[in-house]
Image (cartoon, helix red, strand yellow):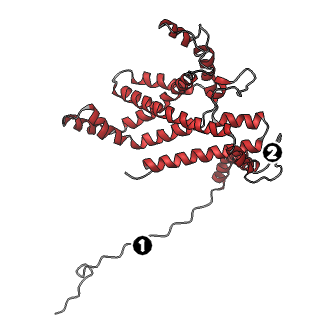
């Protein structure tokens, strides 16, 4: 007697049930029209006031444009060569690199330290977050004028000189050329006051994302505070630290408002300023000398420098790599 084997006995799986094909999605004309109506102003604004302006500025950098923003005689890369041969522009590049090398580590360490202190508190954490973040809402122009006219005005009645008088120090002109260059105190303290709170919030968010059981396990194993920071906290803050470092570096190399407002005279001139970053130098070339071709070339050179520094930092610290 022969028996027929079923598909189950032969190890075959039953074919999956076939699904009915989905009906094609209908074109929702009202929704598409509403989307276009909402997005079109933003797209047109970006195209007209940003991308078109960038493209026109690049064309100006390749032509002779003196006293006008119209395209003049085609000069190729002559504007770039002229700018790179100018001692003032080269000096401003070295100055901003040195300024970034000082202000970025100071801001990084201060914001990380404040974030760790605030994160350990059990009460008053919300108040301190708000208090430290409030300076970030102040414009650089207003803060620079406050530093210039109240704190470091060089008068005996100024806040900095009044505090120095309590310790027996003589009044000094903080924002003038001198030896030592005391104007760096005003520049660095101003930038720290404006930026530490913002980056502290970013670090605080990174600290709160660290799983608590990691610190609890380390404390049970008898790890010291330094060991916990080195082996747990710091590795967990890697991505946050690299992102903050990139933002700080880009912001430092784009410094303009504090340098311009601290050292400008009543007519807005900065020719006698003790230090001028690239943007202040290019501001004088473009709007002071009315040489928009060279000024546009300088803007693209500075953009290339910032891009190179950003890519180098991302390459060194492995930003975006998977853990």
- Considering every residue shown, the one lying at the far front of the view is 179
Given this view, does label 2 or label 1 mark the residue nearer the observer?
Answer: 2
Circle number at residue 65 = 2
Above or below: residue 289 compared with residue 27:
above
Is 25 positioned to the left or the right of 113 in the image?
Answer: right
| Secondary element at tag 2 | loop
Q: Position of residue 148 (x, y in %)?
A: 62, 18
Which sits in the foreground, 187 or 234? 187
Circle number at residue 188 = none
Tell me the distance, in whole angstroms, between the alpha carbons under discs 2 and 1. 70 Å
Residue appearing at x 42%, y 52% in the figure = 321
- Considering every residue shown, the one lying at the far left of the view is 1
Which sits in the foreground, 6 or 163? 163
| Secondary element at tag 1 | loop
Circle number at residue 18 = 1
- Does any portion of residue 301 appear in the rendered image? yes
- Does any portion of residue 251 appear in the rendered image? no
Residue appearing at x 57%, y 47% in the figure = 307
Q: Quadrant of the N terminus?
A: bottom left
Residue appearing at x 43%, y 21% in the figure = 127
Question: Mark 2 near mark 1, Cβ–Cβ under 8 Å?
Answer: no
Above or below: residue 213 compared with residue 141:
below
Is 228 positioned to the left or the right of 222 in the image?
Answer: right
Classed neighbour count for the residue bearing mark 2: other residues with Cα under 10 Å, few (<14), some (14–19), many (≥20):
many
Above or below: residue 129 compared with residue 211:
above
Mark 1 or mark 2, which is nearer the start of the sequence? 1
Q: Position of residue 222 (x, y in %)?
A: 19, 34
Q: Position of residue 122 (x, y in %)?
A: 33, 24
Above or below: residue 12 compared with residue 133:
below
């Amino acid at each position: 007697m022969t028996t027929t084997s079923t598909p189950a006995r032969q190890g075959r799986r039953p074919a999956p049930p076939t699904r009915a094909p989905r009906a094609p999605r209908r074109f929702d004309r009202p929704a598409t029209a509403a989307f276009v109506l909402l997005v079109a102003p933003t797209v047109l604004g970006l195209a007209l006031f940003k991308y078109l302006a960038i493209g026109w500025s690049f064309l100006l950098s390749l032509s002779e444009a003196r006293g006008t923003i119209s395209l003049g005689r085609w000069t190729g890369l002559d504007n770039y060569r002229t700018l790179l041969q100018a001692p003032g522009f080269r000096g401003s590049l070295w100055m901003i690199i040195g300024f970034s090398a000082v202000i970025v580590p100071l801001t990084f360490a201060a914001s990380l330290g404040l974030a760790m202190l605030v994160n350990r508190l059990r009460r008053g954490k919300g108040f301190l977050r708000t208090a430290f973040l409030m300076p970030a809402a102040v414009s650089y122009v207003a803060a620079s004028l406050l530093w210039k006219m109240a704190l470091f005005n060089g008068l005996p009645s100024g806040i900095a000189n009044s505090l120095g008088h309590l310790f027996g120090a003589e009044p000094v002109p903080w924002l003038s050329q001198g030896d030592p260059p005391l104007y760096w105190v005003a520049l660095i303290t101003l930038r720290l006051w404006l930026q530490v709170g913002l980056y502290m919030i970013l670090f605080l968010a990174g600290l709160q994302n660290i799983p608590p059981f990691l610190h609890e396990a380390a404390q049970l194993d008898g790890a010291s505070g330094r060991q916990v920071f080195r082996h747990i906290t710091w590795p967990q803050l890697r991505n946050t630290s690299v992102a903050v470092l990139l933002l700080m570096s880009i912001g430092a190399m784009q410094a303009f408002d504090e340098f311009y407002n601290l050292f400008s005279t009543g007519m807005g001139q900065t020719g006698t300023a003790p230090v001028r970053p690239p943007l202040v130098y290019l501001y004088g070339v473009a709007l002071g000398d009315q040489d928009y071709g060279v000024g546009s070339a300088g803007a693209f050179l500075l953009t290339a420098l910032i891009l190179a520094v950003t890519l180098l930092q991302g390459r060194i610290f492995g930003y975006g790599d998977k853990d």
